[in-house]
Amino acid sequence: MVTSRDLGRAQATAREIGGDCAGLGVDLSQPHQIAPALAEVDDVLHLALVALHRDNNKVREYNIDEAIKLVTLKLVGYTECVHVLAPKMREDASIVIYGGLARNQPYPGSTTITTVNGGVSTLINSLALELAPIRVNAIHPGQVGDTPAWMKQSKEVLDNLKSRTALGRLVTIEDVTNAAVFLLENRGVTGVNLRVDGGRMMK
Ligand SMILES: NC(=O)c1ccc[n+]([C@@H]2O[C@H](COP(=O)([O-])OP(=O)(O)OC[C@H]3O[C@@H](n4cnc5c(N)ncnc54)[C@H](OP(=O)(O)O)[C@@H]3O)[C@@H](O)[C@H]2O)c1
């Protein structure tokens, strides 16, 4: 199943993926609406929590409403999804939660994103402990060069970011999804925060 805030968009994406894929409408920034929205989901093997509200928020010009949207979505919304789906998960099920490199490498305007990505890093610990043998891990990508957010940046910005990675390139959606599949499928891995950043922390 794939989800979007917009049911039509989820269904169009499901058709594009094909096979038995189906679309569901759910807004993770409205946690009380998550249980009814996921009522028809059953027999869960893998859960990927990926949604993001982009909040560029400097503390001197703090926008409370934007911050609440992101904090609610990532910390309460993600957790409520796990709460709702846990009884429907198989014993060998697994969960991957998306954080990001901003937890360790802040930039001006990253206050909320740095906070929630730090929260994701520790959220997996209690979830992995409480839900075992269901496994729970987090993935922390660096700037993903072929996502819309980065494709629109100038060559100067991108070259600067690339020069700060050990690999000399930005990671790709394929790099990140391959790592997410590893976390979902490897039966020995739980409570792990995995960086996929082309060696950004080394520079
Ligand atoms: N791109 C990067 O460079 C990068 C770097 C580090 C970490 N990450 C992490 O990777 C994940 C994916 O990033 P991305 O760049 O692919 O994000 P994105 O392009 O902004 O996509 C975010 C998705 O979240 C959904 N969404 C937004 N608000 C929602 C809500 N309230 N409820 C439910 N769904 C909602 C949107 O779908 P609809 O609009 O259809 O609802 C959209 O498909 C995020 O968790 C992000 O923190 C990304």
Image: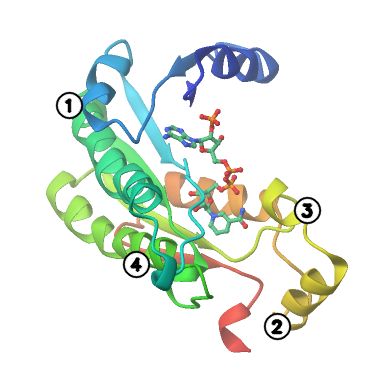
Disc number lying in front (1 or 3): 3
Between 150 and 189, the residue placed more toward the observer is: 150
Q: Which residue is mark 1?
A: 87
Query: Disc 3 versus disc 2: distance between alpha carbons?
Result: 18 Å
Q: Determine crowd level at label 4: few under 14, some 14-19, many 20+ residues with C-alpha closer than 10 A.
A: some
Q: Are marks 4 and 2 in contact (CB under 8 Å)?
A: no
| Residue type at tag 3 | Met
Residue tagged 4:
118
Q: Nearer the viewer, residue 50 or 1?
A: 50
Q: Nearer the viewer, mark 3 or mark 2?
A: 3
Disc 1 secondary structure class: helix
Q: Is 87 located above or below residue 65 in the figure? A: above
Left or right for 145, reference 54: right
Kind of residue indicated by mark 4: Gly
Of labels 4 and 2, earlier in sequence is: 4
The three-letter amino acid code for the residue at tag 1 is Pro
**Residue name at image x 28 percent, y 25 percent:** 34
**Is residue 61 visible to the viewer in this orientation of the structure?**
yes
Pick the quarter of the image with the C terminus.
bottom right
Instruction: Indicate which disc, 1 or 2, sits on the residue closer to the N terminus.
Output: 1
Q: How far, Cα to Cα, is label 4 from label 2?
A: 22 Å
Q: Residue tagged by mark 3?
A: 151
Looking at the image, residue 134 lies above or below residue 104: above
Q: Residues within 10 Å of mark 1 (few under 14, many from 20)?
A: few
- Which disc, if any, is residue 164? 2
Q: Position of residue 24 (x, y in %)?
A: 45, 16
> Residue at the location (64% across, 14% down)?
12
